[in-house]
Image (spheres, helix red, strand yellow):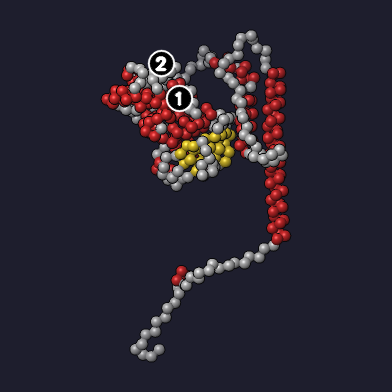
Amino acid sequence: VPSGRTLTVAAVSDWSQAPVSKQAPVMHVPADPVEFEARLGSLERRLAEFEAREQRLLELVEAVHRLSEAIGPLLKPPRSSSPPAEGRRRPEWPLPAPSAGAGGPVAPERIALAQARLRETLFAGPSAEAGEQSAALPPADVPVPDVAAEVPPPGRRSWLLRSLRRMVKSDPQAAGRLMLALTPAHALAGLPPLTWLPGQPEGIARVLVVGRLRRRIRWEKARLNCAPRAAYDLAPLARLRATPAQLADAGVSPDPALAFTLLACVLEPAWTAGHRFTIAHRGPHAVTYFSVRERDRPAITSEPPSTPAVTTICCLDEALFPVLSGKLEPAVTVLGAIAPLQLVQRWFARATSG
């Protein structure tokens, strides 16, 4: 380079600075059709074996169920002429239609429901019926635990009251159904036994979610066919501070849609940051979906959402609320990943611990 002159050299230091071709590069990967055919045949054989095992498992469950029904009368002790105790029934599980014809693969939900029906039959067998009368009353020397004494008194810092307020705004019918579902927990609220509500459940819920000064205004807007005092007396029921497990032990058993709605109202949207999944409950009559959406209220639907369910809970309708409370009874079957259900259970316990 002559003196007094400068030579400028432009170099490409990164692939991102290189000129981009308009045509995508074509990669030729050598393929062996014989090897691919062999792998495909192996996968088809494994799939056929898996479907055969599912079919044999379903047939075995059905055979055990028929056997238990056949030998059940032989194992029952002679009973007196008194009428049988009411309140115990053997669940009738309508199995969903198989996903294929005769000899085809069996849906996992069908196997789970058959297993749940078998467990319900075994747990409600003759041994339980024989000991039902003796187990109704505990021995005289065994103290009966006072469940109401372990529950904090009703108050304004109740998670149920917060949930009812949100339900009244978003779904008033669900708020009324929740008030009806809470009536078995009258003892925890210090109320006498409740056989009915003094007015329309939706109107009762609207009156009870406000303070004393605004109850009269809400009572007039709701047009309840009862005295204001009759509605005000139910305030402790809406302000219960019992945990979901204590409510379940007291006999509170909301339907699956209401249980999921209560869970959705009590959760904070900030807790769902980074999470997006769907949990399904398959009961004897319907399937309910609970979809967790990132930083938003979960959605409850009866139609399959766009996000497939990663966890399916197969149990009776009244058993779902205890499952969400943290109890997994032997008659409950969980299909798929267990981690989403455990996460929802921790959220529910965190939201109802105060």
Q: Quadrant of residue 233?
A: top left
Q: Quadrant of residue 9?
A: bottom left
Residue 259 drawn at (x, y percent) = 47, 31
Residue 84 drawn at (x, y percent) = 60, 14
Whole-angstrom CA distance, mark 1 to mark 2, is 16 Å
Disc 1 to disc 2: CB gap under 8 Å? no
In the displayed structure, 144 sits above or below 268; it is above
For the residue labelled by badge 2, is the local secondary structure a helix, a strand or a loop?
Answer: loop
Label 1 neighbourhood size at 10 Å, few (<14), some (14-19), many (20+)? some
Disc 1 target residue: 181
Residue at (69% x, 41% y) in the render: 104
The kind of residue on which mark 2 rests is Pro
Q: Is residue 152 visible?
A: no
Disc 2 target residue: 192
Q: Residue furthest bottom?
A: 2
Label 2 neighbourhood size at 10 Å, few (<14), some (14-19), many (20+)? few
Residue 163 drawn at (x, y percent) = 39, 32
The kind of residue on which mark 1 rests is Ala
In the displayed structure, 142 sits above or below 323; it is above
Task: Look at the image and tell me in which quarter the C terminus lies.
Answer: top left
Q: Nearer the viewer, residue 14 or 225?
A: 225
Q: Quadrant of residue 313?
A: top right
Task: Look at the image and tell me in which quarter the N terminus lies.
Answer: bottom left
For the residue labelled by badge 1, is the local secondary structure a helix, a strand or a loop?
Answer: helix
Residue 221 drawn at (x, y percent) = 32, 25
Q: Residue furthest left?
A: 213
Residue at (70% x, 26% y) in the render: 66
